[in-house]
Amino acid sequence: KVTRRPLMAGNWKMNLNHLEANLLVQKLAASLTEKQLTDVETVVLPPFTDLRSVQTVVEGDKLLIGYGAQDLSPHASGAYTGDISGPMLAKLGCTYVVVGHSERRAYHHEDDGVVNAKVKAALTHGLTPILCVGEGLDVREDGRHVAHCADQLVAALSGITAEQATKIVVAYEPIWAIGTGKTATPDDAQEVCRAVRQRLVEIYGQDTADQIRILYGGSVKASNIAAIMSQTDVDGGLVGGASLDAEEFAQICRFP
Ligand code: PEP
C-alpha cells in the first residue's frame, strides 16, 4: 500500500452552536495524544457560524486539529446574498472545504458545473476541497455505481491540472449509506475508491494519483472504521453523525 497520511474529517452538518462547537473540539483534542494527531490527520467541518470560535480555540490552545467548512461560493465576493466565499474561509484559518456533498447536490440543486466551479474556487483561495462523489440506491441497484462516480469525478475535475489535483481530497459517499446506519461493506468501498484512483491515474498519471487521498463516507462508526481502512485505496473517512460525539470520533481517529 502506498503511504498516504490517513485523514478523518468530521462533517457536523447543521448541528452545534459556537459554544457547543468549542466544547466538542476541546474534548476531541483531549481524547487524542499528540502522536495520534500526528499519525492521523484530524479535521472538523463545523457550520459557518462556528468557525471563528473554533479558530480561537484551535489557535489559542495550539490544538493539532484542522478545520474547514461544508461549502463555499464559487465567487470570491459580490452580490451573492447568503453565500460565504473562499477568501472569507481562508481568513478564518480553514484549510479544508467540502464540495459537492450529496445533500448540497440534492437540496440546493448543485450540478457538476457548480461543483467544478467550487473546486476551482477552493484551490484558488488555498483551501483543500474534499470533493464528494456517490451514487443513489437506484444507480447502485442498476449496477452503474462505478461509472456514475467516475463521471462525477471527471466533471468536477474539468480544467484542474495535475499539480492542483495533488491538493484535492476525494470522498466516496454512497447516498444510500449516509445517515442510514447502512454502511457499504469494505469491499464496496474499495471497489469505488479503486475505480476513482484508476480514473485519476488515467487523467493525471500514477504519481499524482498515488498522492491523492480518497475517503469513504457513509455511516462510519468506531466499530466499522478499521475494516474500511484496511482497504488499499481508502485513505480516511468523512464522518457525519459519529463525529458529533467526541469519544466516538476520537475512537475513529485511533483506528490503527
Ligand atoms: C456525511 O454526510 O458526510 C456522512 C458520511 O454522514 P453519516 O456518517 O452520518 O452517514
Image (cartoon, rainbow, N blue to C red):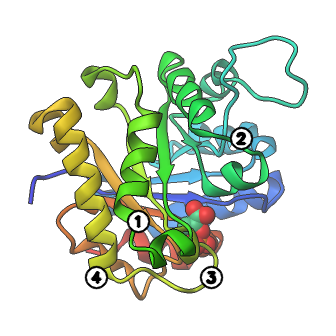
Report, in whole angstroms, how far the alpha carbon at label 2 lies from the one at label 4.
32 Å
- Give the SS element for disc 1: helix
Q: Position of residue 87 (x, y in %)?
A: 64, 18
Q: Amino acid at mark 4?
A: Ala
Q: In the image, is 28 to the left or to the right of 172? A: right
Q: Position of residue 244 (x, y in %)?
A: 65, 70
Residue linked to disc 2: 51
**204 over 183 or under it: above or below:** above
| Quarter of the image that includes the N terminus | bottom left
Q: Position of residue 153 (x, y in %)?
A: 40, 43
Question: Answer yes or no: do the residues labelled 1 and 3 have beta carbons within 8 Å?
Answer: no
Q: Amino acid at mark 2?
A: Leu
Residue linked to disc 1: 145
Crowd tier of the residue under label 2, counting other residues whose Cα lies within 10 Å: few below 14, some 14–19, many 20 or above: many
Q: Earlier in the sequence, mark 1 or mark 2?
A: 2
| Quarter of the image that includes the C terminus | bottom left
- Give the SS element for disc 4: helix
Question: Of discs 1 and 2, which sits in the foreground?
Answer: 1
Q: Earlier in the sequence, mark 2 or mark 4?
A: 2
Residue linked to disc 3: 180
Question: Of discs 1 and 3, which sits in the foreground?
Answer: 1
